[in-house]
Amino acid sequence: MDRKGALSRQQARQSRLVAALAGIWLLLILLLGGWWATIVIRQATRVAQLSIAIGGSEAQALQELQETQRMLFWESSTFLLLLLTLSAALFWFYWRDMRRARGTQAFFAALTHELRTPLTSVRLQTEAIAEGEPSPELVERLLADTHRLESQIDKTLELARLEGGGSLAEQAIRLDPWLPRVLGTIVGTEGDDARLEATVEPDLPPIAGDTAAVQMILRNLVENSVRHGDVAHVAIEVQARRDGDGVEVRYADNGRGFDGEHERLGRLFERGDQSRGTGMGLYLVRVLMDRMGGRVSFGKAQGGGFEARLSFKASA
Amino acid sequence: MSTLPVPLLVVEDDPNVASTLSERLRGSGFTVTHAPNVAAATAAIEGGHFQLALLDVGLPDGSGFDVARTLQHRSPGTAIVFLTAYGTPDDRIQGLELGADDYVTKPFVFRELLLRIHNALRRAHELQQPSAATQGAVRIGRATVDFARFTATVDGVAHPLTHKESAVLRLLAERPGVAITRDEILDRAWSADEFPTQRTVDNFIVRLRRLVEQDPAHPRTIRSIRGVGYLFEAS
């Protein structure tokens, strides 16, 4: 999507203005500090001169002057440093909030796009059917679009539930034969002609997790492969094996992968694709894994596709 | 207008929307070429001629605005209708300033889209029909304008004009020496449901002055009439 429109230009102008104001503010603090130190040192010198003029000891006056100067130097330096640190912290908080606000704005724009696009398709197909043009293809597309809408709404609700502190129902899950069966159902629903190869190492300990959460993780990964893989025939390979005391599930597809920084994937408001998706799917994968005491890392598969490594705790 | 099927370019990345929309447009008598991204749209524009382009704003490798810019350079006569799921005021303003003939927010009713396509085609057709004042090469300031080809030639270099730029310039050229109000320019060049503002007109005049004036800072060909609008001073 082109978000470099009038809005981005306005944001860039705003950022430049804030940077200019920050520069002026810092310059003003330094000038004021310098001015204040000069005046006070000048006053102290004058007091020392007056002390000599009224018959005081010159050596004692000079010593007191040096002590005053030292004290003023440290006082003013500390004060200026505190002021500068406070200013820098204020600007940093402002910058962080602006960045978050822009991320939120982009997220809701993407969410709107993700809901309106299947809705457009549903409306076009329903109108065609209402006008007497029903065909198996139209009905198939209609079903696919309603499924997309359902999936998007499910993810949004789950995100709201988790962000609101919603809990998971943890239990022991034996991956053989649960994992291949669940994956088979998900792949069958998400992509008709997607090929799945799922293997589970024998004698794996059961993992500690919430079955609904693990299903949502797998569904989001499969949906990611089908929607963003950009290949005619999606092939998914999943392997579950022992990893130290826990279990690692390695998920890989044959898609185009992600060329950017993989560490950024799975953070809310970060997307692998500039036009499609909200980034919510992989964010939920990361949050759900964290909540189950596991971890996830994203990377490039051997064939260049997308890879996710899910590390689960073994059930006690 | 010609009774031959009207060639349309549909640039839409969502396969379901693209398929159903293309089928319905074909059923309504149009010849449809579909492009799922900017690269495919650019190749289609280079290889064919389209009377109208339906452009989705969000595309995987860029945006519909990029395709609109390519169309302006390669095929300035093509009418442009943006289809978008965003529909924010900023997007709409950017689309209108790029010379789009219309801006439709998803989801839309197909009959309404058809109506808007026909309106955009009719306006594009009217723009290409010369009046007595706009027939052939018309001298406007330092530019020689060919309204049928949507080009303004300045110092031997041809600059493409968008439909809106051409409409505004044509309105001024048809009535030299007469002050034309901003409201009249809005009424004649934009459709009622596009929600442009008088500021949009001023932005178009600024761009046209860069083309036709010797010194755009001191315009002598398109003069501002304070509180009214603009006046074309024929040289």
Image (tube, rainbow, N blue to C red):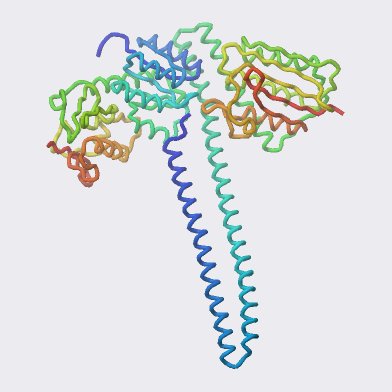
Residue A265 picture quarter: top right
Residue, x 86% and y 17% (percent of image)? A203
Residue projecting furthest to the top: A135
Percent coordinates x, y for residue B34 in the rendering = 43, 14
Q: Where residue B17 appears, x then y in whole percent?
A: 48, 17
Q: Find the residue positioned furthest to the bottom.
A: A55
Q: Is residue B119 visible?
A: no
Which of the 4 quarters of the picture holds residue B94?
top left
Q: Locate residue A134 relative to residue B45 in the image: left or right.
A: right
Residue B40 seen in the current view: yes
For the residue pair A94 and A300, the one nearer the viewer reads as: A300
Residue A73 locus on image (x, y percent): 61, 70
Residue projecting furthest to the front: A59
Q: Nearer the viewer, residue A165 or A181?
A: A181
Residue A23 sits above or below residue A210 on the image? below
Viewport quadrant of the C terminus of chain A: top right
Q: How many marks?
A: 0
At horizontal 35% and vertical 9% (from top left) the residue drawn is: B29
**Which of the pair A135/A209 is nearer the observer?**
A209
Residue B120 point in image, percent of width and height? 31, 22
Q: Nearer the viewer, residue A102 or A264?
A: A264
What residue do we see at 31% from left, 30% from top? Answer: B192
